[in-house]
Structures are given as C-alpha cells and as structure tokens.
Amino acid sequence: METRTNQHLKIVGTLTVIFAFLHILLFLAIGSGTLLGCGISAVSTDVDGVVGGLVTSGFFAVIALVGIALFGFVGLAGMAVAQGRTWGKVATVIFALLMITEFPLGTAYGIYALWAVFGEHEEQVYA
C-alpha cells in the first residue's frame, strides 16, 4: 500500500512536469516570435533595421533555448521526485521557491511542493 507521503510526492512530481511543460510552450512561443521577427527584419531595406532585428532576434532565440533546456530539466526533476530520488527533491525545492512568485497558481504549487518535500514524513521517504 502506498503511503500518503508517496502520494503527495507523486502529485508534486506530476504538477512539476505540468508546470515545466507549460513553461516550455511559453518559450517555444518566444522562439517562434523570434523567427517571425527575424523574417520581418530581413525584408527591411534599411541596413540598421536588419542588423538590429537580427541582433534582437538572436538574443530572444538564446533566451528561448535556455528556457527550454532549463524547464526540460525541471520536468525531469518532477519525474525524479515522484520516484523518490534525492536529486529530484533538491531541484523541485529550488523550482518551488521560484514558482512562489507566480501568483496565484505558482504560489499554491510552491507552498504545496515545499510542504510535501519538507513535511515531518520526509526522513522516511529519502532515508
């Protein structure tokens, strides 16, 4: 029979994967907007406009790639915490602390994740 602690950690893991997926979608939207901006600037006849557009597009493309990689790791951490792995716990705690600032859903997730990971039952799961 599965303990309540394991159930809470599986819920936290699932929520972490969902939040990571939603953030990846956000960064994919940023990346696609970057490609659109790059295409628009390439049509411009003004050299400064083309260079500025390409530099800006490159900057946002890098941000999108870093965001996708970061939240890909967060998704893996969510799966790891659901399986009771210690490294997933550490990454999920860091992600939960960052998500607390995203009111209201991130705040609810962050508080719940911290409670599930650091509850009085914690030493039984990660021992």
Image (cartoon, rainbow, N blue to C red):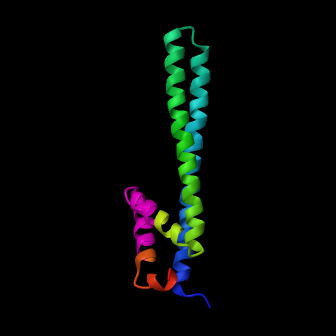
68 in relation to 87, above or below: above
Residue at 41%, 71% (x, y): give it: 114
Find residue 101 and report its horizontal and vertical position in percent: 37, 56
76 in relation to 56, above or below: below
**Residue 69 visible, this orientation:** yes
Residue lying at the far bottom of the rendered structure: 1
Q: Nearer the viewer, residue 21 or 6?
A: 6
Q: Nearer the viewer, residue 42 or 90?
A: 90
Residue at 53%, 9% (x, y): give it: 47
Find residue 120 and report its horizontal and vertical position in percent: 40, 84
Residue at 44%, 85% (x, y): give it: 121
Magenta residues, start to end: 93-115
Q: Quadrant of the N terminus?
A: bottom right
Residue at 53%, 63% (x, y): give it: 16
**Residue 105 visible, this orientation:** no
Dominant secondary-structure state across the stretch colored magenta: helix
Using the rendered view, name the quadrant where residue 104 is placed.
bottom left
Residue lying at the far front of the rendered structure: 127
Find residue 86 and report its horizontal and vertical position in percent: 52, 72
Find residue 39 and report its horizontal and vertical position in percent: 62, 22
Q: Is 91 on the left or on the right of 10, as rendered?
A: left
83 in relation to 92, above or below: below
> Is 121 included in the stretch rendered in magenta?
no
* Picture mark count: 0
